Amino acid sequence: MVDRLTCDSCNKCCQRSGLVLLTDADFASLPEGIRQYALPTVHPYTGLSGPVKYVIDVPFGSVCVFSTRRGCYLGDNKPESCRNFPSPDYYAKPRMRMWLKENCALYEEKEG
């Protein structure tokens, strides 16, 4: 069993490849110049469904376009997927749990 994390803003999760998932509300709150990086989701390609309508791809070896030395450029307006990271789905995947264990100081597995 894994307890939900309370983020201390170390930003390590922003410094890995993957997808930044955006809802319509997230997209609307992005600064105009950054919206150009958001791609509409194509469900067969991404396997995403539900409220996620756009993605920003963070290529392998890159950092999130919103990541700065002081944290997220978007501050309190960061995407919902980032505010809620790591989601329960993260804990269900062994590879993702391993990444959390190696990179997140707040991650702790508990027996039970």
Image: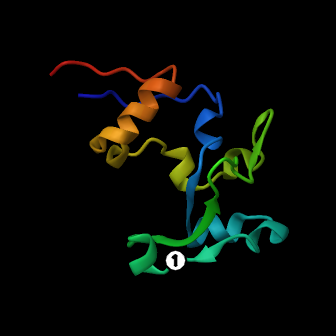
Note whether 98 is above or below 22 in the view shown.
Answer: above
Using the image as rendered, state which of residue 40 and residue 101 is in the foreground.
101
Mark 1, Cα crowd under 10 Å, few <14 / some 14-19 / many 20+, is some
Q: Position of residue 75 (x, y in %)?
A: 73, 44
Q: Position of residue 23 (x, y in %)?
A: 54, 68
Residue positioned 63% across, 76% down in the render: 39
Q: Position of residue 79 (x, y in %)?
A: 60, 55
Residue positioned 79% across, 33% down in the render: 70
Quadrant occupied by the C terminus: top left
Q: Residue furthest right?
A: 33
Q: Label 1: state its secondary structure.
A: loop
Q: Is residue 74 left or right of residue 2?
A: right
Marker count (numbered): 1
Query: The residue under label 1 is which amino acid type?
Result: Thr
Using the image as rendered, state which of residue 58 and residue 32 is in the foreground.
58
Using the image as rendered, state which of residue 112 and residue 76 is in the foreground.
112
Q: Position of residue 22 (x, y in %)?
A: 57, 65
Quadrant occupied by the N terminus: top left
Residue positioned 30% across, 28% down in the render: 2
Q: Residue furthest left?
A: 112
Q: Which residue is mark 1?
A: 41
Note whether 74 is above or below 12 in the view shown.
Answer: below
Q: How is the image coloured?
A: rainbow
Residue positioned 51% across, 20% down in the render: 105
